[in-house]
Image (spheres, rainbow, N blue to C red):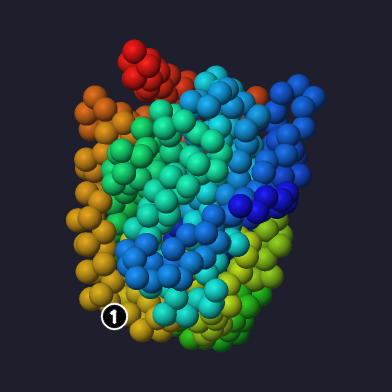
Amino acid sequence: MVVKTSWWSLLLLVSLWGLSAPALLLRRLREHIERFQESSGQHLSSGLGSGAVTVPRLGWLEQPLDPFNTSDRRTFLQRYWVNDQYRAGQDAPVFLHIGGESSLGPSSVMAGHPAALAPAWGALVIGLEHRFYGLSLPVGGLDMAQLRYLSSRHALADVASARQALSGLLNLSSSSPWICFGGSYAGSLAAWTRLKFPHLVFASVASSAPLRAVLDFSAYTEVVSRSLTSAAIGGSLECRAAASAAFQEVERRLRAGPGVRAKLRAELGACASLDRPEDQAELLGALQALVGGSVQYDGQAGAPLSVRQLCGLLLEGDGNHSYHTPYRGLRRAVQVITRSVGQRCLSFSREETVAQLRATTPHVSGVGDRQWLYQTCTEFGFYVTCEGPQCPFSQLPVLPFQLDLCQQVFGLSVASVAQAVAQTNSYYGGQTPRATQVLFVNGDTDPWHVLSVTQDLGPSQPALLIPNASHCLDMAPERPSDSPSLRLGRQGIFQQLQAWLQQAKERQNRGRV
């Protein structure tokens, strides 16, 4: 085991959208939130005693590249982090923070939960980076021959292998209860680890976990639309109507002549010409991501726009409800977002997007664009559309336009993607997994909660739905401005863990008799 210290890559607040202009914007938004929380010191505020400075340890595990073929001797190094400042003995609980489709850094064991929960039970905290993301990269790049070893099933096998290897490396008792934590896709992995390896993992907390794979994720925009009307977070019926008017004005200008489109391009910050339909779809998708991101990350530290702020821009000075005023508000929202996240353009050409995704050289920080697109094409779908009659935004980009990326980048047909989504739900059970001792935590503002579990499935499958909470907000470091409902939700997580760990303690005591 190699151990050294490093400080980079922060709190994981993921966006799962299929890759194109929308996903690129959401990625920048998430990275901006991470940087903000780093500079404000929030990644250290939770999990540190008064005046104490604890540096988590970095280690590497040698893992099989193909865990399902024992004759294949190829391996890769998987990165993990350890925070042992609270560890209370050899048989103390182990809180395992599972990484998702991004690099994983020391904040995974220092901030938010599980780090905030560890002191109550003297738990050891471990963060495990997902294969093919961050620095946990197999040798050989990201060509198709390599990507066949990237899937949630491979990731679960890594968790099981790491669970056994780290027990020896860290001198853990066989009676130590392991609790998995994860948010978004990693939240699904936390639940599925308990489903597939109940003998290795005692319980799991799955935050904002999309358990049901879906090809056409139109429900995303339905939740965004509904959230824009929520007075509790600053929305209103007038706000949603203004958003709809702004999109109608953008589409009207796209249908106009080249001169009008050129002006629109300059005003909204599109890198590409807007004369081609595919580049128009990229722009409209990015605008929807801007609105969707304001909802998805509403109220989070570092988010450039909350729902309240977005609605304020769209409705500012709107006395006559013309299309022009909401459009001006949308333009200002674009400026706020792009300046905050340091993005050169709101949208790029479709040709440039495809070229970037075809590149097989991995990036060691942030979201792995090519890797995650591959997982959406071969497992999950998650392609956000707005094709229903009640959608207040643009009906572009349509589903075939998004699925075409799987064909252009990987040569995968629409039929194969649809089949992969069906197989994922069959393998894991969709929104009715048979895993016990899993706590599902969601916020009803978060568009992803509709793919998760929001009601108890049974006495050992509890669910918490936190009013007015956004994506993975329960995992973020605590703040004085946290709402009463968020505080109550975190209290519910604590109480459920307390009950489960009490069961584990009783089991340990029986084993000693």
Position above or below: 40 against 29: above
What's the residue at 25%, 51% (across, down)?
Answer: 428
Q: Position of residue 261 (x, y in %)?
A: 57, 80
Position above or below: 1 against 56: below
What's the residue at 26%, 59% (across, down)?
Answer: 424
Position above or below: 142 against 127: below
Q: Which residue ends up furthest to the front in the rendered image?
A: 513
Position above or below: 306 against 467: below
Pick whichever, 498 or 171, lies toward us.
171
Q: How many marks?
A: 1
Mark 1 is on which residue type? Ser
Q: Position of residue 30 (x, y in %)?
A: 59, 53
Q: Position of residue 440 (x, y in %)?
A: 36, 35
Pick whichever, 190 or 337, lies toward us.
190
Pick whichever, 360 or 442, lies toward us.
360
What's the residue at 30%, 56% (across, down)?
Answer: 213
Pick whichever, 143 or 357, lies toward us.
143
Q: Position of residue 331 (x, y in %)?
A: 62, 61
Does the rendering let one see residue 398? no
Does the rendering let one see residue 434? yes
Q: Which residue ends up furthest to the right in the rendered image?
A: 51
